[in-house]
Image (spheres, rainbow, N blue to C red):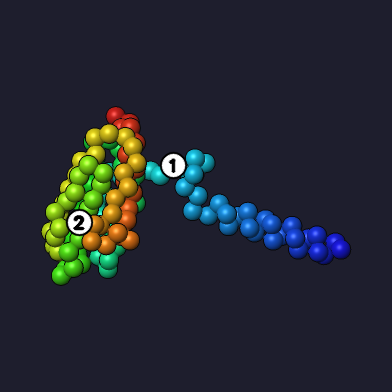
Amino acid sequence: MKKLTTLILAMSLGLAACSNAGNDGPDALPQTPVADPVITIEDMQFENGTVTVEEGTTVTWVWEDAPMEHNVVFAGFESPLQAEGTYTHTFEDAGTYDYHCAPHPTMTGVITVVPATGG
């Protein structure tokens, strides 16, 4: 019986550790803001597409998936549909901005904008 209890305890601790992996909830550690983020569009995905920045930061998307055309769509704005080049957007207000590619809605990312520290 002691072995069974030990096994159950070990399994419970393992499950608890796994359940916190990738925790994005309110107890998650905050990410350090990135100063000049560049998000690459390549292989049908936004590489480094989830990023934290401070208010006033300009984010740059770089297309490297030609000839496939993609865009960047947020609530309130949309980049042109393009196969190469860049697009920039400056985030002035704190908040969470989910985005996607209109022709490929499984391509997603999140920009989290935090108040500027002034430093």
In the rendered structure, which disc, 2 or 1, sits on the residue that comes first in sequence?
Answer: 1
Which one is nearer the viewer's eye here, 96 or 62? 96
Q: Which amino acid, by three-letter code, is at mark 1?
A: Pro
Q: Residues within 10 Å of mark 2 (few under 14, many from 20)?
A: many
Where residue 22 sits in the image (x, y, percent)? 49, 53
Q: Residues within 10 Å of mark 1 (few under 14, many from 20)?
A: few
Q: Is residue 5 left or right of residue 36?
A: right
Please determine whether, in this image, residue 19 is positioned above or below residue 29.
below
Secondary structure beneath label 2: loop
| Farthest top residue in view | 118
Q: Which residue is mark 2?
A: 71
For the point 29% across and 50% down, the residue is 99
Please determine whether, in this image, residue 2 is positioned above or below residue 87.
below
Secondary structure beneath label 1: loop
Rendering quarter of residue 34: top left
Label 2 vs label 1: CA separation? 28 Å
Q: Is residue 114 left or right of residue 23?
A: left
Q: Quadrant of the N terminus?
A: bottom right
Q: Which residue is mark 1?
A: 30
Rendering quarter of residue 40: bottom left
Rendering quarter of residue 41: bottom left
Where residue 16 sits in the image (x, y, percent)? 63, 54
Q: Which amino acid, by three-letter code, is at mark 2?
A: Asn
Q: Is residue 17 left or right of residue 58?
A: right
For the point 20% across and 56% down, the residue is 71
Q: Quadrant of the C terminus?
A: top left
